[in-house]
Amino acid sequence: MLTGLQPEILNEQQKTWFAVAVCHAIVADGNIDPSELSYLEQALSFLSSKTQVDSLVQAVKDQKLPKLDKFPLATRELEVKIFIELALITTADDVISTREIDFLMNVGRILGFGREFAKILIRWASEGIIWRNKMHKIINSGVELHPEYVT
């Protein structure tokens, strides 16, 4: 996790909520991109019950996930880190759709963040997409260069 969020510090209710939220983030745009599958695997690994895992996998396939209620009692820092992780998941495919923005705004409300804070997070995530796209262009242009060694 890029924020330093350590799922092992979450209690069982928090792990379940987070796993469901990750699944919501993955399906928010209507399709599951291969770049998001590692997040799904990681989210499912939080769960201790195979029945729970199987149920959530089926819910993802059907895109009929359980409703997200208020996050179980936690520190504000933990809630911020979870919100950031969800934003990173929605941008894993280097696109943030209107549906993903709506998802993040909704999760922001559920976590008790105001509209302005959610907008700041979404703007930051969007800037990350631009940064990654530029990085890919730099890599591609660098690959085409002939080495120029100084002797």
Image (tube, helix red, strand yellow):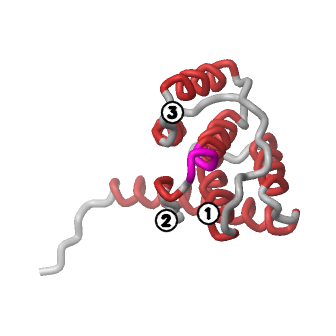
Q: Amino acid at mark 3?
A: Pro
Marks 1,3: beta carbons within 8 A: no
Front position in the image: 54 or 61:
54
Q: Quadrant of residue 124?
A: bottom right
| Numbered disc in front, either 3 or 2 | 2
- For label 3, the residue is 34
Task: Name the residue furthest right.
Answer: 115
Instruction: Please state the horizontal and vertical placement of residue 113, each as a whole percent of the image.
Output: 81, 64
What kind of secondary structure does the magenta stretch mostly adopt?
A: helix
Q: Earlier in the sequence, mark 1 or mark 3?
A: 3
- As helix, strand or loop, the secondary structure at mark 2 comes to loop
Q: Is residue 14 magenta?
A: yes
Instruction: Examine the rendered structure and indicate whether residue 82 appears above or below residue 15.
Output: below
Mark 3–mark 2 distance (CA, rounded to whole Å): 23 Å
Marks 1,2: beta carbons within 8 A: yes
Q: Which dot marks residue 42?
A: none
Residue 52 seen by the camera = yes
- As helix, strand or loop, the secondary structure at mark 1 comes to helix
Q: Which dot marks residue 81?
A: 1
Instruction: Please state the horizontal and vertical placement of residue 135, each as a whole percent of the image.
Output: 48, 60
Q: Amino acid at mark 2?
A: Gly
- For label 2, the residue is 4
Seen at 60% across and 27% down, the residue is 56
Q: Amino acid at mark 1?
A: Lys
Q: Is residue 8 magenta?
A: no
Residue 1 seen by the camera = no
Magenta range is 11-15
Task: Name the residue furthest left.
Answer: 151
